[in-house]
Image (spheres, grey):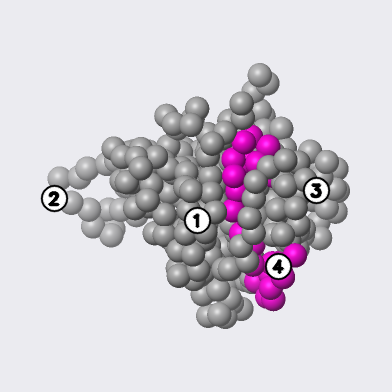
Amino acid sequence: MGLLEGKVVLITGGGRGIGRECAILSAREGARVVVNDLGGGIHGDGADAGPAQEVVDIIRTEGGEAVANTESVTDLAAVNRMVQQAMDTFGGLHAVNNPAGFLRDRMIHNMTEEEWDDIFNVHMRGHFNVVRASINHFRSQKEGSYVMWSSTSGLIGNVGQTNYGAAKMGVAGLARIVAMEGERVGVRANTIAPGAATRLTDSVPNRAPEVVAMREAMRHINTAERPAQLAVALCAPASAHVSGQIFGSAGYNLSIYQHPRPIETYARDGGWTAQSIIQDFFPRVEKHMEPLERPEPQTPIQV
């Protein structure tokens, strides 16, 4: 019996990249799958029904059950129809896995309002929409799992991705609170910050020879299947005790992230002035200040 036997899963962005692997792997684990994909380009342009249907055909060829949907997660009415499609076609819905998204990279001093708004629309609004469309169903059946997709662009930072990073940081906050609000009624939410070689990551410019060489050398390890396996595990009933967490998946490595918490707190009789903050508080906490460059990768613990 598969990990998702008898469950119905909605996968957004399921036609390509990580979403495609999530859909195929979910079906192999016994789920009936609604494969949603607008079929747009890496910058959100255009539409194509082909990718979603291709994944459905693969699942059916392997003996699974799936149906395609080609609407946009940016439209709440459309996401309501996705949920209804799952109910009408398969008689239920138990998990929503939402990797749908695209990029509009630009340095902040050159970014347009449209580039900012479009990214927030697909990533933050898209995550709100899938929750809002399904949360009352999950609450009523006292079972439901959300897998939301963040990024190290937000959790750690990445030059040229203020819109994407800000939205992805917001996704982590959304998931945490959905998990807190859903705890007493069996509704779970977790976040994944993936590392995988996809058409989106390939589009991020980086001409540094060492980065290009490393990206190519790791391509066979950093496949979209790696984070998809984690997503499937988080949807499984066997993981019912796991909620409100931020995980990382890249190649053979899995990580768990620490939620932001105060490191040290200092009190001063009468309160702080701007001058005393500069003279006394900043020097005390300077040892904890994060440098602006991205941290070196951790050495994984072999298991």
Furthest residue toward top: 303
- Element at badge 3? helix
Q: Which residues are magenta?
A: 24-50
Neighbor class of circle 1 (other Cα within 10 Å; few <14, some 14-19, many 20+) is few
Residue at 69 percent across and 73 percent down: it is 47
Determine whether 33 is above or below 81 in the image. above
Looking at the rendering, in which quadrant would you find the C terminus?
Answer: top right
- Element at badge 1? helix
Q: Are marks 3 and 2 in contact (CB under 8 Å)?
A: no
Ranked by sequence position, the earlier of labels 3 and 4 is 4
Residue at 68 percent across and 21 percent down: it is 302
Q: Nearer the viewer, mark 4 or mark 2?
A: 4
Real-space CA distance between mark 1 and mark 2, rounded to the nearest whole angstrom: 63 Å
Neighbor class of circle 2 (other Cα within 10 Å; few <14, some 14-19, many 20+) is few
- Element at badge 4? loop
Q: Which residue is mark 1?
A: 88
